[in-house]
């Protein structure tokens, strides 16, 4: 800084310093950044008699022009501290101690010692306040991110993919980052909200970002290859901030934020102007946001994989438990259900009945009409059984043309009545693909304590074959003493 004095410049007198105290007090307590910048620019311009520009410091070594007063003649919106030191204008840290908020560029040559002291005092007070507001702004946004993180966690089970995530929360991200567009450039898709470039341009952007070293966490337009930077319509998307989204050191993609390009430099009649750019606090907040989104995407992927696994397991379970022709339970599932029913009956003392039925003359149907018609007959009988039974009754295809029904609770009369209804309903309902009447023979057996699983099935099977020998199309109930004894009325022989 040149220490010579230019008598033509206004030099404050010591007596005037008391008048500056209200201004300094205001600078040290103001709550709005824009108001501080505006007033600071006015005070410095009045103090030095020359244009003033304020730059916000960025960790990449550049400083962004965010405010200038009295038609500052500098035509660039970004600069390094070295490039600001041209002619009589010098970059001064704002504040002077690290970490500084930014720089002010103003005319310093020829100022009196007292003037330079006042200037330095102004910069330090305003800079400290700006730095405090910066940290306050960052913490406030961090709290908003925490609140949004809790909301995402509470909703995560309802989200099926990245599109639903951005539809629910993209508007908040745009408001938080003061952006007009946001895109999740994932490894297999582009998910966007707001004003963004075309899909083809975003694909090029993703390729350019992926080519950067893995250690590179963020990128801006100026850091992209020239051909990629040229592909972005800078008149609308001049400010890009891309943040790598990683989970456990694995890159999921990039979070790209677009802010409308800064307006053109003001005319000579403009008194002041402010510029928008991505700053250090913006970058930090964007990195926190990218971390949250990356975790949310990972959880969604895990939940999607779990849903697919559960769906696959359910499918295999259905295949393992269901008869592929009729869709009812198969022999394996019936075996399990019968064992469970017997254990429950033994524990509660409830009656348990087993119905075993067989389609009469099924071999003849297959021989005369073919296996396709035979399959149709089996499906037809299964649909009628399902129609007659209660929801709590267990049933299925035991094998071939045989079906089994497990009835828990009720009386012997109820079990036999159910069997009679099944027999009668099947006998009177014609099969759409078979001209002859379909009938079944049914054996009914009651479980008794001490009777084993296989013994119960054999008792019902014996009763069913006894019904076959006695003329078919009938119900036979096995007594607990012997499978050859019968009780109840006998059905008429099949015609």
Image (cartoon, helix red, strand yellow):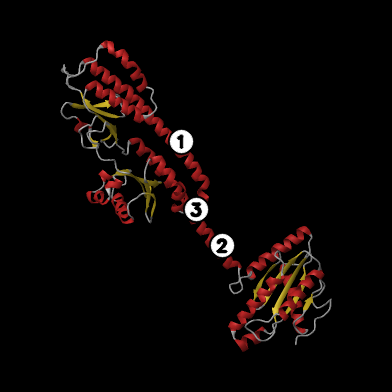
Which residue extends farthest bottom? 368
Disc 1 and disc 3: Cα gap in Å? 27 Å
Kind of element beneath mark 3: helix
Label 1 sits on a secondary structure element that is: helix
Q: Position of residue 189 (x, y in %)?
A: 38, 56
In front of the other: 279 or 420: 279
Q: Residues within 10 Å of mark 2 (few under 14, many from 20)?
A: few
Few, some or many C-alpha atoms within 10 Å of disc 1 (few <14, some 14-19, many ≥20)? few
Residue placed under numbered mark 2 in the picture? 314
As drawn, the residue found furthest toward the top would be: 15
In the image, taking residue 377 as reference, residue 20 lies left or right, namely left
Q: Quadrant of the N terminus?
A: top left
Return the residue nearer the eye: 235 or 28: 235
Residue 151 position (above or below residue 389)? above
From the viewer's perspective, tell me whether residue 165 is left or right of residue 106. Answer: right
Q: Earlier in the sequence, mark 2 or mark 3?
A: 3
The percent coordinates of residue 272 (x first, y second) are 28, 32
Q: Give left or right: position of 170 versus 119.
A: right
**Residue at left offset 28%, top offset 34%:** 273
Q: Is residue 49 visible?
A: yes
- The residue that label 3 is drawn on is 303
Residue 280: x and y, percent? 33, 36
Residue of label 1: 143
> Based on the displayed image, in which of its 4 quarters is residue 67 positioned?
top left
Vertical placement of 421 versus 273: above or below? Answer: below
């Amino acid at each position: 800084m040149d220490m010579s004095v230019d008598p033509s410049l206004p030099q404050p007198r010591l007596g005037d310093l008391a008048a500056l105290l209200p201004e300094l007090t205001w600078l040290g307590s103001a709550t709005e950044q824009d108001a501080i910048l505006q007033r600071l620019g006015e005070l410095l311009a009045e103090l030095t008699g020359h244009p003033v520009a304020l730059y916000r410091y960025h960790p990449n070594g550049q400083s962004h022009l965010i405010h200038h007063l009295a038609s500052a003649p500098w035509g660039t919106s970004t600069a390094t501290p070295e490039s600001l030191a041209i002619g009589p204008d010098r970059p001064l840290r704002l504040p002077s101690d690290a970490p500084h908020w930014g720089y002010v560029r103003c005319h310093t040559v020829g100022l009196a010692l007292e003037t330079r002291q006042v200037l330095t005092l102004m910069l330090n007070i305003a800079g400290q306040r700006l730095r405090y507001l910066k940290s306050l702004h960052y913490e406030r946004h961090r709290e908003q991110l925490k609140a949004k993180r809790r909301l995402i966690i509470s909703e995560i089970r309802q989200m099926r993919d990245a599109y639903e995530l951005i539809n629910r929360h993209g508007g908040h991200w745009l408001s938080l980052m003061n952006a007009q567009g946001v895109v999740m450039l994932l490894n297999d898709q582009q998910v966007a909200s707001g004003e963004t470039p075309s899909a083809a341009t975003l694909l090029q952007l993703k390729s350019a970002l992926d080519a950067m070293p893995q250690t590179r966490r963020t990128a801006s337009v100026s850091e992209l290859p020239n051909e990629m930077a040229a592909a972005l319509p800078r008149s609308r998307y001049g400010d890009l901030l891309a943040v790598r989204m990683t989970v456990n050191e694995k890159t999921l993609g990039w979070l790209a934020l677009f802010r409308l390009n800064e307006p053109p430099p003001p005319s000579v009649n403009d008194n002041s102007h402010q510029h928008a750019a991505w700053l250090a606090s913006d970058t930090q907040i964007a990195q926190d946001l990218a971390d949250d989104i990356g975790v949310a995407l990972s959880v969604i992927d895990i939940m999607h994989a779990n849903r697919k696994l559960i769906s696959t397991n359910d499918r295999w379970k259905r295949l393992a438990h269901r008869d592929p022709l009729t869709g009812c339970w198969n022999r394996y599932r019936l075996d399990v259900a019968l064992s469970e029913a017997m254990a429950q009956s033994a524990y509660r003392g409830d009656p348990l009945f087993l119905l075993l039925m067989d389609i009469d003359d099924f071999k003849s149907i297959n021989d005369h009409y073919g296996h396709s018609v035979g399959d149709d007959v089996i499906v037809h009988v299964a649909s009628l059984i399902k129609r007659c039974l209660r929801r709590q009754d267990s049933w299925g295809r035991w094998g071939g043309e045989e079906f089994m029904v497990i009835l828990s609770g009720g009386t012997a009369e109820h079990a036999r009545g159910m069997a009679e209804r099944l027999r009668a309903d099947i006998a009177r309902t014609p099969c759409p693909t078979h001209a002859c009447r379909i009938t079944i023979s049914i054996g009914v057996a009651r479980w008794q304590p001490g009777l084993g699983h296989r013994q119960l099935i054999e008792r019902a099977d014996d009763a069913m074959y006894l019904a076959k020998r006695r003329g078919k199309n009938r119900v036979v109930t096995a007594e607990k003493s012997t499978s050859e004894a019968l009780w109840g009325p006998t059905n008429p022989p099949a015609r």
